[in-house]
Image: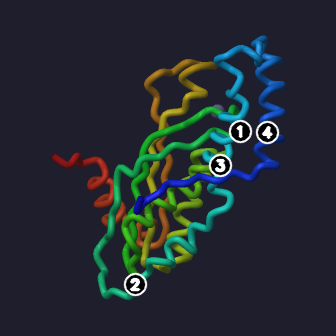
Amino acid sequence: MAYQRTESYDQQTTDALMDHYKNIIGLLGEDVEREGLIKTPERMAKAMQYMTQGYEQNAVEILNSARFKEEVSEMVLVKHIELFSMCEHHLVPFYGKAHIAYIPNGYITGLSKLARVVDVYARRLQVQERLTTQILKAVKESLNPLGVAVVIEAKHLCMMMRGVQKQNSVTTTSAFDGEFLNNHVTRNEFLKLISADLD
Ligand SMILES: [Zn+2]
């Protein structure tokens, strides 16, 4: 077998999380020993560790690992990057897409690395506003570009499943730096590009 996908979990952390999840399921009024739930604490323990693996990853290192010298001064834009994160107030998901643009200043990075940076910060307990600025800061630190722009559009399950139950509301957050902040022509070009659909 040439390719094997493996996931590894720290046993001590997994065991401790399992104990807590067992208690939580019981407190919610369920029988944790019934067939359908017997393995749920273990699954939750592993799922939560997977969904918070971003704490162990370094976005700037990822960008630096594919940084190349290149004399390009046109905007580089990756849009519609899928995003799944978890709201830190309710521990339920928010999901949507991220759009990232930068104007190189001697260096570019691998396009897939920008998508990985989104995962690094999305796989933590988050608020959408902080997620947006963390992505911007990582790109800025690694590439020192002439400008960076990040826009995130997301739906929050904590709003859709509980509370105000606004099923179709989309939250948009943005962060701009350099040329995107100072030059409205550049910023408008970016905003036009991300709202235009590919076909
Ligand atoms: Zn929430």
Spatial separation of the CA atoms under disc 1 and disc 4: 5 Å
Q: Which is nearer the eye, 51 or 95?
A: 51
140 in relation to 79, above or below: below
- Please name the residue shown 76% across and 21% down the image: 25
Spatial separation of the CA atoms under disc 4 and disc 3: 13 Å
Whichever of callouts 2 and 3 sits on the residue coming sooner in the sequence is: 3
Element type at mark 2:
strand
Spatial separation of the CA atoms under disc 3 and disc 1: 11 Å
Ligand 1, by image quadrant, is top right
Label disc, if present, on residue 17 of the rendered structure: 4
- Please name the residue shown 79% across and 48% down the image: 13
Q: Which residue is mark 2?
A: 68
> Where residue 22 sits in the image (x, y, percent)?
80, 26
Q: Which residue is mark 3?
A: 52
Question: What type is the residue that disc 4 sits on?
Answer: Leu
Q: Which residue is mark 1?
A: 45
Sort mark 1 into few (<14), some (14-19) or many (20+) by Cα contacts within 10 Å.
Answer: many
